[in-house]
Image (spheres, rainbow, N blue to C red):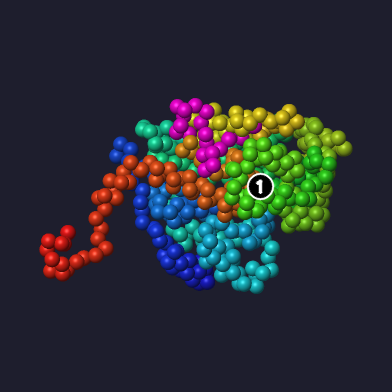
Amino acid sequence: MSPAEQALAEQARAELAALAYPDRSWVVPVTVDGEPCADVLVAGGGQSGLAIAHGLRRDGVFNVAVLDARPAGQEGVWENFARMTELRSPKLQNGIEFGQPSLSVHAWYEARHGAPAWQQITRVPRQDWMAYLRWYRAVLDLPVENDVSVVDIRPGPRDGVLAVETSRGVRFARSVVLATGFEGGGAWRVPPVVAALPADRYDHACTPIAFERFRGKRIGILGHGASAFDAAVVALQAGAASVDVCFRRLALPVVNPHRHLETAGMMAHWPALSDQVRWNIARHMRAFDQPPGVASFEAATALPGFRMHAASPWDGVSFNGSDIRVVTPRRTFHFDHVICATGYALDLSVLPELRALAHGVTLWRDRFDPAPEEASAELGAFPYLGEGFEFLPRAPADKWMSRVHAFNFGAFVSMGPHSTSISGHKHALPRLLRALVRRLLLEQEDGVVAALRAYDERDLTIPPGLLEEDTYA
């Protein structure tokens, strides 16, 4: 941490102390057979997990556990498989600083690079965003436990408690938040025609890839989104002879519908919209999608060897022992290696942490019956979430499932396509936090009046003899 970053950290901590009221811990502790029980356990220590932990502390909830499967400083996608040079979100986005300017990426970036540097950028560089998250975690001393995976969530030994099986043993928690990003609702999609290739001949763009293998190679990429163009840039920079990006759409999207939805009204009150409206917004987003990031698109199209092919789905893929033959409606390609930038298949059942509840939670197809022309099996498989991102059980006997909150891609239809992204945090985090804190308060409601009556911390000390003895109580 540079001296300027350290000074900003000290300023942020001083402001936190000044703004802390009311900061007293108020949640009555719970134990399970003598074992500690977290008030909230967060699976995922990336940007959302860090912000959730900070937000709960601001509300006086300190018994929080944050678990992340990756090593310290490597949480999230930013230095694993994200390859863009800059974020897609505008640099003025905010949310995880909870209105405290000294804790914002703006203040941090100026401390690290200088105010003129902030003025020169349009979006925050990706690696700087990860450096900011590390600084944010250090400033707030957030309780992240690294190298710990959540592998199952099930009912605990008594009502109101969940048993969370981790790679280091069973933990107990009253609520669990799945802050697991795009990976938190299923698996990356690889078309069967590609999956039939030898495993060393293809990759998914949203996984780590050894690009140095591609020097002098012909690379084919299926898909048109951000990850497709990011992978194309890195492959060509690593020395690939050529990169052909193929996609089924007749033209590359150039309008980003996310920007239209990013208003305070939409983001703050999304769950109040009717099912019909939420469903059709999701359908529109699926039909039109986002364009690739500006910086990645411009970088790819400026590199020699880059080619782009619209209306070119891969109808046939075969391998003859030396090269990969890809047949499209327009032409046939020959590649040495292929990359699938084909997005995500939502399927709760493939995730170990959801195996106990995947078949018992309410899905959109259980609650909403669209007109035939609006039907979508894909959208129908998304979980139908409550207003606090909680799963809703189909059967009353499974009420424990509502203690698990899907603050991840699974919230796409219920809470909006932006809800768990950087640009949505300003409005989505308070909604989640209210739900968690409300549950904790209501579960100790029966003791509120007794605790009030027992409260005896004096504001005043009356000196002896100041009042007549018969009037002093």
- Residue 158 visible at all: yes
Q: Amino acid at mark 1?
A: Ala
Magenta residues (range):
380-401
Residue for badge 1? 210
Residue 452 % position (x, y): 29, 50
Residue at the image position 63 percent from the left and 44 percent from the top: 416
Rendered-image quadrant of the C terminus:
bottom left
**Is 400 a magenta residue?**
yes
Q: Is residue 317 above or below residue 95?
A: above
Q: Nearer the viewer, residue 51 or 111?
A: 51
Q: Is residue 296 above or below residue 380?
A: below
Magenta segment's dominant SS is loop
Q: Nearer the viewer, residue 439 or 472?
A: 472
Residue at the image position 15 percent from the left and 62 percent from the top: 471
Residue 41 % position (x, y): 44, 44
Helix or strand or loop: what does disc 1 sit on? loop
Residue 92 % position (x, y): 63, 62
**Is 87 a magenta residue?**
no
